[in-house]
Each structure stands twice: as structure tokens, then as C-alpha cells.
Amino acid sequence: MADTSIPVRTCVGCRRRAPVTELLRVVVRDGGLTPDPRRRLPGRGASLHPTAECLQAAVRRRAFPRALRRGAPLETGPLEHHVHRSAGEQV
């Protein structure tokens, strides 16, 4: 019988563990944070609940550079736009 369990990851914003189906994968592309909803882009990824609260907590805690092993601050514009749009908020 095949193991059909769903992998679990930790949100870099709230630090709660959740199935990958509930989290948004984020990667670095051209010095900025890029959402990867299909989980297909290459490179190291960080997981985040797609909510404004978790995004703000991750930015405030400087969690993205640490999780993605980058020394420099990362541009959050495309990620913020994606999270606000998916939450149905005005950007």
C-alpha cells in the first residue's frame, strides 16, 4: 500500500506547521521574493500561509533571508501583491 501522506512544512511567518497544500511556496528570483503556487520553480523555497498577517510577521522577523539563505534584504513587492490579491484585498 502506497503512503499518500501530505508533506508538512513550517510557515516562516507564524512558525506553525501545516500541510503544504495550505502554504504558499516562495523562492528568490532576480533578487525578489516570488510566489510559487504550483511549487515548480527551481531553488530553495520557504513556506508561508498566504495571509497578510503571516507575510507581515515574516518581513518583520526578517525570516525570508534566513530561510532562503540570503545575506541581503529581498524585494517583497511581487509576493505582497500575490498575497493581497489572493486574499481578495485591494492593492
Image (spheres, rainbow, N blue to C red):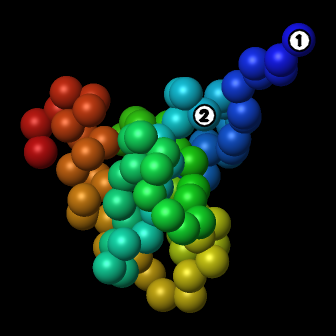
- The residue at 35%/60% (across/down) is 34
User: According to the image, label 1 marks what residue?
Assistant: 1
User: Is residue 63 rendered to the left or right of residue 51?
Assistant: right
Callout 2: SS:
helix
User: According to the image, label 2 marks what residue?
Assistant: 20
Q: Residues within 10 Å of mark 2 (few under 14, many from 20)?
A: some
Q: Residue furthest bottom?
A: 71
Q: Looking at this view, is 72 or 53 the one in front?
A: 72
- The residue at 48%/87% (across/down) is 72
Residue 43 placed where, x, y %?
Answer: 54, 67
Which image quadrant is residue 32 in?
bottom left
Of badges 1 and 2, the one in the foreground is 1
User: Is residue 87 rendered to the left or right of residue 26?
Assistant: left
Which image quadrant is residue 37 in?
top left
Residue 53 placed where, x, y %?
Answer: 43, 40
Q: How many marks?
A: 2
Q: Is residue 61 visible?
A: no
User: Is residue 79 rendered to the left or right of residue 60?
Assistant: left
- The amino acid beneath tag 2 is Val
User: Is residue 4 rendered to the left or right of residue 74?
Assistant: right
Question: Which label is found at residue 16?
Answer: none
